[in-house]
Amino acid sequence: MTQRVRIPGSDRLGKTLFPGAPAKVDWGLERMSTALSSLASPHRKYRCLHVGGTNGKGSVASTWASALAKHGERVGLYTSPHLWSYRERILVDGRPLPPSRLAQTAGELAPLAARLKMSLFEAWTLLAFVLFAEEEVSVACVEVGLGGRLDATNVVSPDVVAITNVAIDHQDYLGKTLAAIAREKAGIIKPGVPVVAIENAGEVMAELEARAQRVGAALHRVDPGRDVLDVRVSAEGARFRFPSALWGEVEVETPLAGAHQAANTAVALKALELLPRPPAREAVLRGVAEVDWPGRSDVRELGGVRYVFDVAHNVAGVQALTRMLGDLDVARPLVALLGVLGDKDWARMLPPLLEIADHAVFTVPMSAPRARTWNPRLVAEAVGALAPVDVVEQVAVAAKRARELAEEKGGTVVVTGSCHTVGDVLAVLGQSPLRSK
């Protein structure tokens, strides 16, 4: 008998689809493998591309999905976390499925997920893989949730694997060193499956190379100095030249701003080249130009004020954001609207941004798990000397204050710190990510 599950209008209660599923990291592939086997392996009914890394995974996956859709494929896209709604995580041909559709299939899967004691992330990953089969997608673009080796998504048999940059993040789970983190992320490399990686620190590449050699996977490197040429960054995105072995040298344009997004796009392009049936050149260029990935290197004009939305939830992310802001030469004053989770390395994250900001507003994203919220007043006392800081805990009021500070002299508001912060601010500004779908 199908269990009836109600989906709320927005995400906060997304876990009601799987009552009792714990919202915690519970690594291991056994539960996912058992669940999928009992359902006749729905994840084997379509081709797959798999991407891991620290930052840029979602940019690569969404670029894949856009290019493959333009090539005529029916595409599933699975990403995490979301900005505002769990519905953002599971897209088919660029669109979220209706709430009733999600509820129906979740209701059928909930008893199995409960019996296997699946975590919330595992249950949603199972839901995505089943829905992709039911929706008859021809290919799925899948982003790793956390790490790689033991991540719930690592049950797929991909045609190609990509690994974006590897940086320090989630040390409690992945390890204290770059080498340890790279080792976990390298766990998605499969025997005989080509893997694309962007050149990084020597210890990172050493781990990726060791894993690729051990399992017999051809490792293809993207070198920004050789494969991402003549990068031009503007509020409209990034342009660069990509010397493709398959399509010849192409002029690439992505709406995702920043030199780091040009590099992410090059990783996506290199992986598409390596598919058994690669998409046509024209489809790729159109897909890249029309990729939709809200809240990441996302520049918008709203009511006469320029906003830059970027989740930048770790040190590497903030460094990429500050470089992008420098390239954009944004209008002053620059107002940083920040909300960071309490377990993040805010002591290292905040200074690079505060040093270039004219003013900052610290807030507490309403969607953040209560156990992970930060104390913005204590943080302001610690870093407030770097820039004037207002502490406004209510997101809607904080967004209004940031706008007032920027609007008076035609400046820029940068919204960052976490997916929760970006999602909540987009929502209070009437820019829900689902509205672009």
Image (spheres, rainbow, N blue to C red):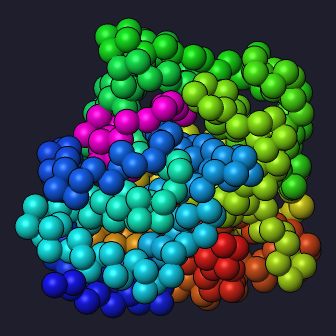
Is residue 52 among what the camera can see? Answer: yes
Look at the picture and state if 237 lies above or below 150: below
Taken as a whole, is the magenta stretch helix, strand or loop?
A: loop
> What residue is at 82 percent from the left and 48 percent from the top?
286
Magenta segment boundaries in residue numbering? 145-168
Quadrant of the rendered image containing residue 177: top left
Residue 383 falls left or right of residue 99: right
Of residues 199 and 241, which is closer to you in this image?
Answer: 241
Quadrant for the N terminus in the image: bottom left
Quadrant of the rendered image containing residue 241: top right
Q: Position of residue 397 (x, y in %)?
A: 61, 88
Quadrant for the C terminus in the image: bottom right
Of residues 328 and 138, which is closer to you in this image?
Answer: 138
Query: What is the total number of numbered labels drawn onto the structure image?
Result: 0
Residue 160 falls left or right of residue 63: left
Residue 255 falls left or right of residue 436: right
Look at the picture and state if 34 lies above or below 307: above
> What residue is at 40 percent from the left and 77 percent from the top?
102
Q: Position of residue 4 (x, y in %)?
A: 25, 89
Q: Position of residue 430 (x, y in %)?
A: 68, 86
Look at the picture and state if 27 lies above or below 380: above
> What residue is at 48 percent from the left and 32 percent from the top?
159
* Extreme-left residue of the structure: 115
Of residues 261 and 43, which is closer to you in this image?
Answer: 43
Quadrant of the rendered image containing residue 197: top right
